[in-house]
Image (cartoon, grey):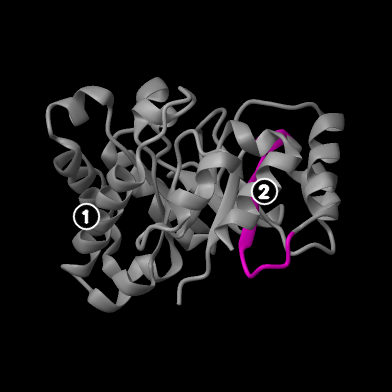
Amino acid sequence: MRTPLVAGNWKLHGSRESVVALAAAVHADTPKNGVEIAVCPTYVHLAEVGAALQGSVIALGAQDCAAQEQGAFTGEVAAAMLAEYGCRYVIVGHSERRSLFGDSDAVVAGKFAAAQRAGLTPILCLGEQLADRQAAATESVLAAQLGAVLDVSGAAAFESAVIAYEPVWAIGTGVTASPEQAQSAHAHIRAQVAARDAGVAAGLRILYGGSVKPDNAEQLFACADIDGGLIGGASLVAGDFLNICRAAG
């Protein structure tokens, strides 16, 4: 049985005051339904959010990490530094990092490996652009993105990793993949891992991300291969995020 995970990606949002208030609100009303919960604030808010979550079961995560462990890489943050701040998770390969900041499949594979070397659990994001879906290229895009990581780290690495399928055309657009579309992509991802190690694939948690809201979460999470969600905008509203967490249970 795979334990559902709901992770909030707070992206470039919040002030010191607002993120502490948000973390405290989620902490105060955390559902006890067997769902694992994580929140991923900006780097500069990690300490304050971590302090606000003390005594809770909510895990702290970061939104990215460097592929390098140290050196002359101005502006980068190493995975080991995140671990020092109490992070359990780190998102790698988010579509915004890929499209806006040029993270190639090879770079993402390096970040994934760096996260695991530091003892963090990477949340590996995969997803196709609208043009890819319209060209019936969804599965080939996902296969290339996932294959780059499998080739570097191997299937066994996914015993301590999470995948998030996020169709780029559904992120922040208000358009959500249908349960059938999401399930098909998740099943394809699981099958690609299973081709290398069926046991690892069976236990691998694959999250859905892309305009998940309280009113569509339950239907999405009911799909056989969807094990929770990576939540963007809705994670910035404590009540909405908590209702999504309840739906996952």
Report the residue at 40% width, 29% height from top: 170
Q: Where are the magenta residues, as a range?
A: 31-44
Whether residue 10 appears in this view of the structure is no
Query: Amino acid under label 1?
Result: His
Q: Relative to 146, does residue 166 appear above or below in the rendering?
A: above
Classed neighbour count for the residue bearing mark 2: other residues with Cα under 10 Å, few (<14), some (14–19), many (≥20)? some
Relative to 159, 132 lies left or right? left
| Magenta span includes 42 | yes
Reading the chain from its start, which is encountered first: label 1 or label 2? 1
Query: Amino acid under label 2?
Result: Asn
Q: Which residue is mark 2?
A: 243
Secondary structure found at label 2 = helix
Residue 173: assigned label = none
Q: Which residue is mark 1?
A: 188
The picture places residue 193, in percent across and down from the top left corner, at: 24, 64
Quadrant of the image occupied by residue 238: top right
| Magenta span includes 214 | no
Which quadrant: the C terminus? bottom right
Image depth: mark 1 or mark 2 in front: 2
Relative to 235, 26 lies left or right? right
Whether residue 117 appears in this view of the structure is yes
